[in-house]
Amino acid sequence: MKRTKIAGIGMYVPQNVVTNNDLLKYMETSDEWIQERTGIKERRYAQRTGETTTTMGVEAARIAIERAGISPADIDFIIFATLSPDYYFPGCGVLLQRAMQMKEIGALDVRNQCSGFIYALSVGDQFIKTGMYKNILVVGAEKHSFGLDFSTRGRNISVIFGDGAGAIVLQPVNANTGQAAQGDPLAGSGQGILSTHLHSDGAAAEILAMYNPGTHANHWVDQPLADFNDNEIGDMFMSHEMIDNAQNFPFMDGQSVFKKAIIKFPEVILEALNKNGLQTSDLNLLIPHQANLRISQFVQHKLKLRDDQVYNNIQQYGNTTAASVPIALCEAWEKGMIKEGDLVCLAAFGSGFTWGSVLLRW
Ligand code: ACO
């Protein structure tokens, strides 16, 4: 049976470290408030110019490709997850293809915010399992620092996010699934992705969202374009009113997000374990999306996991959305916390709401 394995992994975070105290220059906040509510001590911000979501993705991809023992020319599909693309369109996948001088391969952008990397990994897994591709590059990258409200008005969100990128190379592996006896906790324990689980609930889509620019704008309602002058037509995409109302910045009802996250995170982790006949005690490492340390701690407590079974690095990098899972996975692997044969669960929850998990044997 063919499975998908992670053949190479890389991460990139910008040099520029921004501490909680550094944010006091822009807004009324405190190191104490930020650490107590989120666990974050510092984050990285990309250079204002010259460094983009794509360039950071390229840096992480180079490392992942090298560690997989292949070259950019061997990649036959790109999946790029981000909510902060270089351009409104086209997506970052094609920019990465150009920057890395890859062949004229397919490039897909995934817009699932915090669970973007889990969705992207799941899509890549299907293409590998069907035999369609042999070397898929999956990237999660964000340059949040360019689009946050750094005034006191936006402090509940802007203190949380950071910049960075993570990347993996997916390859097929022949899974040795038949040897373990039925009922054995290691049944189905061959290397590779055991299962992926994706969910969404759009009922609360506006609870964590950036509203504009977007085609929902009321200006369009029932009036022919001819009724508007040139300036008004330009305003439909991004009006002064939208900017004055901070609608070009993300909005978050933090408490509602928190309440939903602490239900869905454990649910989707247990779904993955149950699907494979495994228990939380079998898990070597859980890599949760680094949304907020309090959410991770709640999940750990709910699932009765030991400290050494959960990896968190939000303290150093903040919430890097689509990049957070691959950055945490890469860092944990580089620290020697993931060894061959280990059972690893990746899980994320975020805007949409969308959430998901990936269970894999390293
Ligand atoms: N510094 C100082 N004070 C602040 C800040 C700040 N950065 N932000 C908000 N406050 C103040 C508010 O103004 C408010 O003051 P008031 O009581 O005088 O009106 C007070 O703190 C409480 O504000 P809340 O927004 O209710 O703060 P809350 O306790 O809910 O904490 C937080 C905010 C940390 C976002 C919390 O809701 C939370 O953990 N939510 C989970 C959502 C999350 O983690 N999202 C991450 C991104 S989404 C994702 O990745 C899934």
Image: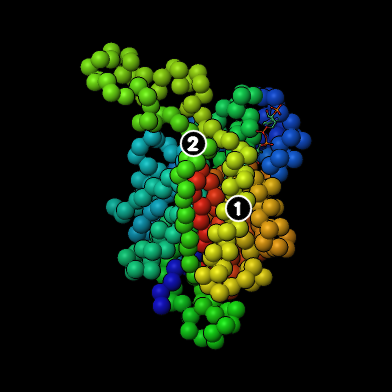
Left or right of 9, for residue 171: left
Q: Nearer the viewer, residue 170 or 235?
A: 235
Left or right of 107, for residue 70: right
Q: Is residue 342 above or below residue 45?
A: below
Visible in this render: residue 100? yes
Residue 94, position in %: x, y?
35, 45
| Residue corresponding to mark 1 | 263
Q: In this view, does 362 lie above or below 180?
A: above
**Circle 2: element type:** helix
10 Å crowding of disc 1: few (<14), some (14-19), many (20+): some
Q: Is residue 179 above or below residue 285?
A: below
Q: Say which mark, if any, is on residue 206.
A: 2
At x 56%, y 74%, the residue is 277
Report the Cα–Cα distance between label 1 and label 2.
Answer: 19 Å
At x 60%, y 34%, the residue is 157
Using the rendered view, name the quadrant where residue 27 is placed.
Answer: top right
